[in-house]
Amino acid sequence: MRKEVKTKKVKRIIDSYIDYKESKQLQRFLTDQGKIIPRRITGLSAKQHRELVTAIKRARHLAILPFVSEAVK
């Protein structure tokens, strides 16, 4: 018999435009290592997740968000 592993699914709904300059909002969708949390866990729609990923990558490029967390270094 296989045990089913349940993942913690959280519904996170973003009502407004996802802005790359809002680092606090983007930080909620990153792990402690700095990785982007997958869509199946965040509960975002596909369109929202694409916008989120683009905003996070822009923020990383402009040094608003780190590429890798300090704990990983």
Image (spheres, rainbow, N blue to C red):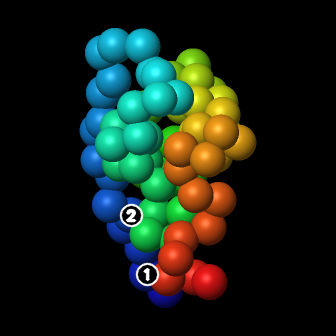
Q: CA distance from mark 2 to mark 1?
A: 13 Å
Q: Mark 2: few, some, or many residues within 10 Å (few <14, many ≥20)?
A: few
Image position, residue 49 (x, y; %)? 55, 31
Image position of 66 (left or right of 14): right
Mark 1 residue crowding within 10 angstroms, few (<14) / some (14–19) / many (20+): few
User: Could you tell me which residue is drawn at 70 percent across and 42 percent down?
Assistant: 61
Q: Residue furthest front?
A: 63
Q: Which residue is mark 2?
A: 7
Tell me, yes or no, if residue 23 can be seen here: yes
Q: Is residue 47 above or below residue 57?
A: above
Along the line of sight, which residue is nearer the eye, 40 or 54?
A: 54
Q: Amino acid at mark 2?
A: Thr
Q: Position of residue 60 (x, y in %)?
A: 64, 46
Relative to the observer, which residue lies in front, 67 or 44?
Answer: 67
Task: From the viewer's perspective, tell me whether residue 13 is left or right of residue 71.
Answer: left
Tag 1: residue type? Lys
Whether residue 46 is visible here, answered yes or no, is no
Q: Choose top left, top right, bottom left or bottom right for residue 5.
A: bottom left
Q: Quadrant of the C terminus?
A: bottom right
Q: Nearer the viewer, residue 24 or 38?
A: 24
Residue visible at 29% across and 38% down in the picture: 11
Spot occupied by residue 43 in the image (x, y as percentages of width and height) = 39, 38
* Numbered circle sitting on residue 57: none
For numbered disc 1, what is the local secondary structure? loop
Give me the residue at 65% from left, 39% from top.
62
Q: Which mark is residue 3?
A: 1
* Residue 70 % position (x, y): 52, 76
